[in-house]
Amino acid sequence: MRYITPHVLLDLGKKMVFVGGPRQVGKTTLAKAILSEHFPEGRYLNWDLDEDRQDILRKRWSTKDTLLVFDEFHKYPKWKRWIKGVYDTSREDHSFLVTGSARLNVHRRGGDSLMGRYHYWRLHPFTLDEIPLSLSREEAFHRLMTVGGFPEPFLEGDEREARRWRRERFDRVLREDIRDLESVRNIQLLSLFLDGLRHRVGGLVVLSNLASDIEISPNTVKSWIEILERMYVVFVARPFTNSLPRAVLKPPKIYFFDNGDVIGDEGARFENLVAASLLKRLHFLEDRDGFNCELRYIRDKEGREVDFAVVKDGAIEELVEAKLTEDEISPSLRYYTTKLRPKKATQIVAKLRRPYDRDGITVTDPSTYFDRFFLK
């Protein structure tokens, strides 16, 4: 059972539930598990299957189907208007679960309003907050750092097969999903652009420099990053500046939902793992509790930088620094902890001998920090 399952079940009794997230993150598996275990008389319909697509368009299902699952429904251009009409006319007979690898969150932009008719959940890959009982925390961490947290490679634990899986996934995202849903003319250049981002994890991404490297315009770079965000391939951490008068607006940092996508040293991959794990927590708090959460970083003119600022409803809740081996507290983390006085300040060290606390800062290992959050 995935971490959002009990919450999805609760929400299905109230409204429609939309489940978004990256391709192959487990949305279909989750939907089918909910059907088989809790709605045995429900119906699963996949937009990618010709027979199911025709049944969807003709609205052919039984009144006994207590749950209707529409999988990969974002590919239907008129899905918002269609699902609104079906829900408004048959919500007394059915519950509705809708999944998609992209665009389910664009219901906030224009078109027919679905306001008040749905709850939205985002499903993330496995992290140390959510590991199968069959795996030790040490083995789970090793797999997250080598093959990533997507279910198939993570559960298999084979690096060669993980590389093959990742290559095929990239090809399908670029040549099928983006081609079908976005107006990108040169997929080959987009692939080179994506490789460039994979080498820049953890660093500031200067759009003009990246544009120059592959000879495209900065506006195109900005547009492509937004597309990759919508497809749940990457996510962006932007600078936090509101409370720092001497801070300057800096370029974004780019991270990947799949930790295995990172090309670079072990430190960059660990920072990406921390970023992805923090974002998973923040999305969960937004989807469950309705908070407005953001993952930011802090950097000022003097070059003092903290990897992550966890922001909830506009205020910094926690400062987090990710280190591979350095167990001495970062001077920048110490400086900003004193200056901003967040509720928590943490330095997560991948290879830590012994945790400790000093000057309001906790130095800990990833297994301790990321432990059973979704059960709290």
Image (cartoon, rainbow, N blue to C red):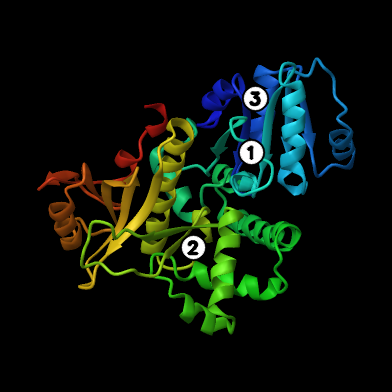
Q: Secondary structure at mark 1?
A: helix
Q: Pointers 1 and 3 in contact (CB under 8 A)? A: no
User: Which residue is identified by label 1?
Assistant: 27
Residue 237, given in percent of the width and then of the height, sits at 41, 58
Look at label 1 and name its amino acid. Lys
In-front residue for pair 336/137:
336
Look at label 3 and name its amino acid. Ile
Q: Secondary structure at mark 3?
A: helix
User: Which residue is identified by label 2?
Assistant: 262
Which residue sits at x=72%, y=26%?
88
Say which of marks 3 and 2 sits in front. 3
Neighbours of disc 1 within 10 Å: few (<14), some (14-19), many (20+): many
Quadrant of residue 185 in the image?
bottom right
Q: Earlier in the sequence, mark 3 or mark 2?
A: 3
User: Disc 1 to disc 3, how far (Cα)?
Assistant: 11 Å
Q: Earlier in the sequence, mark 2 or mark 1?
A: 1
Q: Name the image quarter holding the N terminus.
A: top right
Quadrant of residue 98 in the image?
top right
Q: Is residue 135 left or right of residue 225?
A: left
User: Which residue is identified by label 3?
Assistant: 34
Residue 24 visible at all? no
User: Disc 2 to disc 1, how far (Cα)?
Assistant: 23 Å
Q: Secondary structure at mark 2?
A: loop
Q: Is residue 92 left or right of residue 160?
A: right
Look at label 2 and name its amino acid. Val
Q: Is residue 33 above or below residue 140?
A: above
Residue 233, given in percent of the width and then of the height, sits at 57, 56
